[in-house]
Image (cartoon, helix red, strand yellow):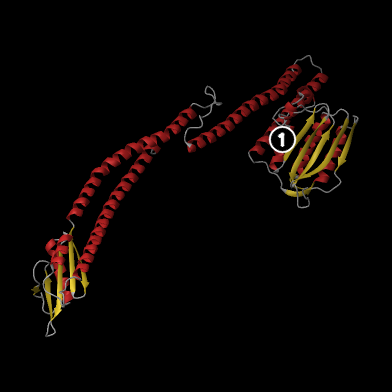
């Protein structure tokens, strides 16, 4: 079942979002225009009503009595306003009844017969407003204002605003598809441009691989887009690790083949030599002894390789507890003394204070024995020393010798598998070239490390660092 592609998926989602945004925007613009039109109409009617109300103050004769005919000044003012208007006046009669008059700017007041005799003047004015609105069929916006005994009814036409609103709605309907089409083309172009570096990365990644391809090739970075460049950089770092692992595997395979070829060749030679019928019993015993030594050498190499494999795959069981380093160092010191008993080499020890560490005592002893064994192998005369160190929550054991030393080039490689600074001498002493590799691995599994400082001709110092226990204060 094929999965959807990123380009069409992004394009479809963005297109739907653009359509929705444009539709909402068009609707909002139309609604806002309609609301603004109504507000403008009301403001216009308010101004007209204000003008009419101010002119009504002139509706009086010189004696101050109200007349039934609008003066010429009032008529000119009302006609000049240009708005449909209606002015009514309610006058109390002698019998207490109220009489409603329509005031025309150019004609005498005309009495209005109430629509319903029981209606009050305010109710009658409201009925007039409804009549105006119904007669206009909604084409007019009407404003009614009470000013003392007068009712001011001002109306204005909505038709110009309706025409503008209709034009705006038509424009929105016409431009919306065009805008959506342009947005669609822009979205497709943008998505295609954004995914182009990703497509290039896919092509470049497919071309990377072991022979006949080139595992050392890398993805082009930067790509022009920040996120894609970050992905390319992370992919390049991953390829570097894969390349390093591949080269390490190739080297490991070659080294293992080389290391096992020598004892296997020796086994075959010894077996062929022993099969010769002319060999004496003493010759056969010598051949069997050689076969045994070669077998032990292969067994030791295989066991070391299995130990490294279990450690690197987190399958090696280690104890994690607090223990005292001093007894472990003392035991390693005794074994080292036995190693150099036939040589003019002295042992110096500075481990008087208690040193609490957290880790595996047995594996720590194995690490220190490896470091001490190397020191004994490469020190023909002089001294080998053991010293306790403390640093930033770590406790260390330094193994220092005055032997031949290690060059700077060799210092960077001595922890590699099967690497020997002096191949002929190490092989003659039965070394597999895996001791320091195992020592560093065991230290790291205990959350520690091994450092080395060496000067050719003056000796070397290896330091095993482990997390200190509660009894140790860092200085």
In screen coordinates, is 254 left or right of 216? Answer: right
Q: Residue 174 placed where, x, y %?
A: 23, 43
Q: Quadrant of residue 447?
A: top right
Q: What element carries label 1?
A: helix
Q: Residue 375 placed where, x, y %?
A: 82, 32
In screen coordinates, is 218 left or right of 272? Answer: left
Q: Residue 353 placed where, x, y %?
A: 85, 48
Q: Quadrant of residue 317?
A: top right
Residue at position x 40%, y 34% in the image: 193
Q: Residue at the top extreme?
A: 278
Picture layout, residue 357 above or below residue 204? below
Note whether residue 21 is visible.
yes
Looking at the rendered image, the quarter that the N terminus falls into is: top left
Q: Residue at the front extreme?
A: 62
Note whether residue 5 is visible.
no
Pointer 1 residue: 438
Query: Observer-nearest residue: 249 or 166?
Result: 166
Picture layout, residue 110 above or below residue 425? below
Query: Observer-nearest residue: 342 or 298?
Result: 342
Q: How many numbered markers are drawn?
A: 1
Q: How crowded is mark 1: few (under 14 residues within 10 Å), some or many (20 or more)?
A: many
Residue at position x 47%, y 31% in the image: 201
Query: Observer-nearest residue: 437 or 294?
Result: 437
Picture layout, residue 99 above or below residue 456? below
Q: Residue 6 placed where, x, y %?
A: 40, 38
In screen coordinates, is 276 left or right of 114? Answer: right
Query: Observer-nearest residue: 163 or 323?
Result: 163
């Amino acid at each position: 079942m094929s999965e959807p592609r990123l380009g069409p998926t992004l394009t479809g989602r963005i297109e739907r979002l653009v359509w929705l945004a444009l539709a909402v925007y068009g609707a909002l613009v139309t609604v806002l225009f309609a609301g603004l039109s109504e507000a403008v109409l009301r403001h216009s009617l308010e101004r007209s009503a204000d003008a009419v109300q101010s002119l009504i103050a002139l509706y009086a004769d010189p004696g101050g009595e109200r007349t039934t005919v609008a003066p010429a000044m009032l008529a000119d003012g009302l006609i000049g306003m240009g708005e449909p208007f209606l002015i009514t006046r309610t006058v109390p009669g002698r019998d207490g009844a109220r009489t409603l008059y329509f005031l025309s700017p150019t004609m005498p007041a005309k009495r209005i017969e109430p629509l319903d005799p029981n209606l009050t003047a305010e109710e009658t004015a409201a009925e007039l407003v409804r009549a105006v609105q119904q007669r206009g069929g909604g084409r007019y916006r009407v404003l009614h204002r009470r000013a003392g005994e007068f009712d001011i009814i001002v109306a204005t036409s909505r038709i110009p605003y309706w025409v503008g609103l209709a034009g705006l709605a038509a424009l929105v309907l016409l431009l919306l598809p065009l805008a959506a089409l342009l947005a669609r083309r822009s979205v497709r172009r943008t998505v295609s441009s954004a995914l182009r570096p990703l497509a290039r990365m896919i092509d470049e990644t497919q071309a990377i691989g072991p022979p006949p391809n080139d595992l050392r090739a890398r993805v082009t970075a930067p790509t022009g887009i920040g996120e894609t460049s970050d992905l390319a950089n992370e992919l390049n770092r991953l390829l570097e690790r894969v390349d390093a692992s591949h080269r390490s595997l190739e080297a490991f395979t070659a080294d293992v083949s080389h290391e096992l070829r020598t004892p296997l060749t020796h086994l075959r030679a010894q077996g062929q030599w022993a099969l010769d019928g002319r060999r004496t019993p003493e010759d056969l015993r010598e051949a069997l002894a050689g076969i045994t030594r070669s077998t032990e050498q292969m067994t030791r190499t295989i066991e070391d390789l299995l130990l490294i494999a279990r450690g690197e795959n987190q399958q090696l069981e280690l104890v994690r507890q607090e223990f005292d380093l001093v007894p472990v160092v003392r035991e390693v010191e005794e074994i080292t003394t036995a190693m150099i008993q036939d040589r003019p080499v002295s042992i110096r020890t500075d481990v008087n204070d208690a040193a609490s560490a957290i880790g595996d005592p047995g594996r720590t002893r194995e690490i220190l024995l490896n470091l001490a064994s190397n020191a004994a192998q490469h020190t023909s005369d002089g001294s080998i020393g053991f010293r306790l160190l403390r640093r930033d929550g770590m406790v260390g054991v330094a193994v220092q010798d005055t032997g031949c030393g290690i060059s700077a080039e060799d210092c960077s490689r001595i922890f590699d598998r099967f690497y020997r600074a002096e191949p002929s001498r190490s092989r003659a002493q039965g070394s597999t070239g895996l001791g320091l590799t195992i020592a560093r691995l065991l230290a790291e599994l205990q959350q520690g490390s091994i450092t080395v400082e060496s000067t050719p001709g003056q000796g070397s110092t290896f330091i095993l660092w482990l997390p200190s226990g509660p009894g140790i204060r860092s200085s």
